[in-house]
Amino acid sequence: MPGAGAILAENHNVDRIEAPVTFKAYLMCAFAAFGGIFFGYDIGYINGIMGMRYFIQEFGNGSAMISASTKSLIVSILSVGTFLGALIAGDLADSFGRRTTIILGCVIFSAGAALQCASTASGMLIGGRFVAGLGVGFVSAIIILYMSEVAPRKVRGAIVSAYQFCITIGIMLASLVTYGTQNFTNSGSYRIPIGIQFVWALILGIGLFLLPESPRYYVRHGELDKATQVLARLRGQPETSGYVTEELAEIVANHEYEMQAVPRAGHFSSWANCFRGSIGKPNSNLRRTILGTSLQMMQQCTGVNFIFYYSTSFFQTLNLEVDPFLLSLITTIVNVVSTPISFWTIERFGRRPLLIWGALGMVICQYIVAIAGTVAGNDKTVVKVEIAFVCIYIFFFASTWGPGAWVVIGEIFNLPIRSRGVALSTSSNWLWNCIIAVITPYMVVGLRERVFFVWGTLCAIAGVYAYMLIPETKGLTLEQVDRMLEESTPRNSSKWTPNTGSMYSVRKNRASVAETANHEEDHEEKEMAGKKASSS
Ligand code: BGC
């Protein structure tokens, strides 16, 4: 009798057609994007709070300002917590499930928000931000993993881009709320913006509680019945539908093949698996981990958080009549309205072109700002041109690198290391976020507008990096991405299709599944023989 593996091998078809994306299925996948609000709101609200008079009096121990080191600690401690949270979450997501880990992240985050709300001195606020950071780390790392795993391949890029869209909405909402409460003369000025965060945690936690777990998590644990059930729910199809069995067959076949290459290991060796293989091989685990972590580093090096953390103080140095706070708010609005463009472009043109052309757009804008500021920084008209180009720069970031970096890290890891790989990449985002948050104020003091030469040069490096190293993953299932990495190089990856692939790995997949089936048959035969022997 054929085992499950053999049945799956027969059904396995690399060119299979995916189930039509129903509206309900689309909404289910897109809901998780809401986690981006957490991420964005946390980046955004602290900027506003630290400029508030009441907050400064309360937390500056009566003095007219909070010391630079305390400020820096308050801002960056969140990224420290997030960095650690993202790393821990990678482990938990494999043991307890993607969904449970995100819900746990919401609970931890709420505890951190409660501490911050209750605080009247910087010690408790810093502790609260650290705890909240752990929660944001859980959510930000695992949401990407969850969304990439549950989304149908045709809209996977768009759905993960929706996460970035929510990040931008979170940043804008934080600016709006702190704008509204900044002149309050009581603790509501900072407690309201902090307290609003509970709402995000509640919506995300309850929403995910109602959503299904990722089918790939169940496949990892060998629970194929549950994997079938959740996949059927996600695709809006009956469990017996050919769409469901074929998609599951591909996930299982690929997982079995990968498990042969990278056997399941203990805690430390499974982390070590992320760093195995040769750096010269585009599909080695080490190469994927370096790609994911360096991509997130490059995203931070585009300088975007210079704008979202420090634009208010930077605009103040430009001596304009316009309220610098309002200008900052405008940059957050440009960020929000530009992001949805990527929903279409990321699926139409692909990930590679978006990252390459986006970097070029950012380089041009940043060099214009830097040159204009250096040549005629005191001329009011020139300053307006500078601000316009800062906004165009944000447009380029928001429509390309913002979503692109998240989409790619959700797609490049194979299932045995996916949760840890995405977690490491997300940690890298927060690590560089923290480094930039700490060093930028010192850079601006010395460089003023010339700081844009630094960001412009880093964006140029990001463009070359994307050209040389980013593979095209558009339109492929996560399992096909695996084979594409094995059979092509980043520069010719956009021409790879499941049919142009050598079929070598497909054969290997089939061989591995068939082998598993044989094992199962052997096992069944032995069991039967054992039963016969014991009954006689
Ligand atoms: C980045 C954040 C940034 C945000 C701006 C995200 O993709 O990771 O650091 O603040 O985009 O929209």
Image: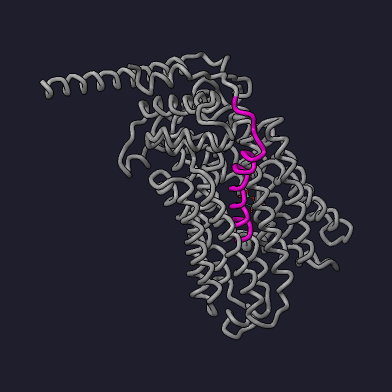
Q: Compare residues 241 and 500 and report the one nearer the observer.
A: 241
Residue farthest to the bottom?
A: 62
- Residue shown at 66%/57% (left/top)? 170
Query: Against 448, is 128 above or below?
Result: below
- The overriding secondary structure of the stretch rendered in magenta is helix
Figure quadrant of the C terminus? top left
Residue farthest to the right?
A: 381
- Residue shown at 60%/69% (left/top)? 194
Q: Is residue 194 left or right of residue 123?
A: right
Which stretch did the figure color magenta?
A: 18-42
Query: Against 140, is 74 above or below?
Result: below
Q: Position of residue 471 (x, y in %)?
A: 58, 29
Q: Position of residue 309 (x, y in %)?
A: 65, 61
Figure quadrant of the N terminus? top left
Number of dots carrying numbers: 0
Based on the picture, tell me whether residue 30 belongs to the magenta stretch: yes
Is residue 461 in sight in this rendering?
Answer: no
Q: How is the image coloured?
A: one colour
Q: Compare residues 75 and 86 and report the one nearer the observer.
A: 86
Q: Is residue 484 left or right of residue 380?
A: left
Q: Give the quadrant of residue 46.
A: bottom right
Q: Position of residue 258 (x, y in %)?
A: 40, 28
Q: Give the quadrant of residue 257.
A: top left
Q: Position of residue 75 (x, y in %)?
A: 57, 65
Is residue 115 in sight in this rendering?
Answer: yes
- Residue shown at 17%/23% (left/top)? 531
- Residue shown at 54%/37% (left/top)? 233
Residue farthest to the left?
A: 536
Based on the picture, tell me whether residue 307 belongs to the magenta stretch: no
